[in-house]
């Protein structure tokens, strides 16, 4: 409803006569201007004025492999260029669900928190998916009989080590009929405490077995848009993480109902060799650029080694920006090169550039 704001009766404050009338008019005008400007400034931004709000920062989720034979990764991470660190992997060591403590877990948490970076522990990984004994142990722990007990163990582990949440990286054959119920119970236990629950998922390796309702329970979905080929398929030489694969993965997960803000595009900091360059473990990006000068600007070197160089990583990061996705996920920070050849630096440069 339109209304006229009350104006002070200034005429009563001055003597009558011409001078009094002039002064009254001046005071009335000033009062109207003051009240009018106050009323105008009290309205919320209706979109006609440029907003001063800062755009939401894109997430940069970096996995780190923290194992006995890895250097002190706590000193290798550039915390200024990531928003989340996922420590890989901590898995059950026995039938009671006791989790292994990775060598530098507490150091990474301490360093990350000082930089306001969130840290999650990641469970699962390749060994839990491909190793029958470890996979069967997971099946036992997430069964109806033991699930509540195991969830409580995970929650305590996260609390004891001052972590910000849990990342579930059960893939392929490790995703069974109890996966959905397991995630549901994790969500019920973690969310009330403000803890994050995320997942690493693959379109071609078990992703189709995850129910849509389960996907909605995760705070972030890290899509593994890589490993389209590799040492397990030596006759299929070629790029394992193309731009087309990144787009296809994005289309798939969005089609499954994952919100753009939750979808984090995975990029590899490693490559695979075929033919004369074949190795069962592949090559880190750091190894590739160290051996082949100028390799940071390419995606293929030595005729049969394929990976992602700086231009492709930046193109994928720009794709994330253009599509309004949640951010970029990296496997893994251990594998990056330093200085101008760094892929993490290339991601950061693209994300912080004015678009």
Image: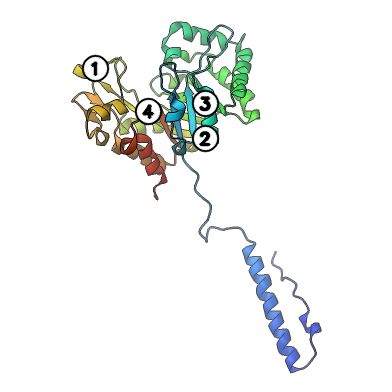
Q: Residue 107 carries which label?
A: 3
> Are the residues tagged 4 and 1 within 8 Å (C-beta)?
no
Decide if residue 194 is on the left or right side of residue 55: right
Q: Which of marks 2 and 3 is nearer the N terminus?
A: 3
- Does residue 95 show up? yes
In front: label 2 or label 1? 2
Circle 3 sits in a helix, a strand or a loop, which is it? helix
Circle 1 sits in a helix, a strand or a loop, which is it? loop
Residue at image position (77%, 93%) is 17
Circle 2 sits in a helix, a strand or a loop, which is it? loop
The residue carrying mark 1 is 278
The residue carrying mark 2 is 117
Circle 4 sits in a helix, a strand or a loop, which is it? loop
Q: Which of marks 4 and 1 is nearer the N terminus?
A: 4
The residue carrying mark 4 is 225
Q: Marks 4 and 3, Cα distance to the nearest angstrom?
A: 30 Å
Q: Give whichever of 355, 87 is nearer the camera.
A: 87
In front: label 4 or label 2? 2
Q: x, y (%) of residue 257?
A: 49, 32
């Amino acid at each position: 409803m339109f209304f006229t704001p009350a104006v002070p009766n200034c005429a009563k404050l001055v003597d009558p006569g011409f001078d009094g009338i002039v002064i009254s008019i001046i005071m009335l005008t000033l009062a109207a201007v003051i009240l009018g400007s106050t009323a105008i400034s009290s309205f919320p931004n209706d979109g006609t004025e440029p907003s001063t709000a800062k755009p939401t920062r894109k997430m940069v989720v970096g996995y780190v492999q923290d194992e006995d034979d890895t250097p002190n990764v706590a000193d290798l991470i550039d915390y200024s260029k990531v928003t989340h660190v996922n420590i890989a992997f901590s898995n059950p060591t026995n039938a009671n669900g006791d989790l292994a403590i990775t060598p530098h877990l507490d150091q990474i948490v301490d360093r990350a928190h000082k930089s306001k970076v969130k840290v999650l522990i990641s469970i699962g990984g390749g060994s839990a998916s491909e190793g029958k004994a470890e996979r069967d142990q997971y099946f036992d722990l997430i069964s109806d009989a033991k699930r509540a007990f195991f969830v409580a163990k995970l929650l305590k582990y996260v609390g004891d080590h001052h972590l910000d949440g849990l990342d579930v990286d059960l893939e392929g054959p490790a995703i069974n009929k109890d996966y959905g119920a397991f995630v549901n119970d994790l969500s019920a236990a973690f969310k009330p405490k403000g803890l994050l629950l995320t997942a690493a998922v693959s379109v071609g390796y078990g992703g189709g077995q995850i129910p849509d309702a389960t996907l909605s329970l995760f705070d972030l979905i890290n899509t593994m848009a890589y490993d389209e080929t590799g040492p397990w398929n030596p006759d299929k030489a070629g790029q394992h993480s193309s731009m087309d694969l990144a787009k296809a993965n994005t289309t798939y997960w969005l089609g499954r109902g994952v919100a753009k803000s939750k979808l984090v595009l995975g990029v590899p900091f490693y490559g695979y060799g075929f033919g004369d360059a074949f190795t069962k473990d592949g090559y880190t990006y750091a190894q590739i650029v160290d051996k082949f000068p100028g390799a940071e600007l390419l995606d293929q070197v030595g005729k049969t080694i394929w990976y992602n160089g700086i231009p492709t990583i930046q193109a994928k990061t720009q794709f994330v920006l253009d599509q309004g996705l949640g951010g970029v996920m990296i496997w893994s920070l251990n594998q990056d090169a330093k200085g101008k050849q760094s892929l993490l630096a290339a991601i950061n440069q693209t994300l912080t550039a004015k678009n």
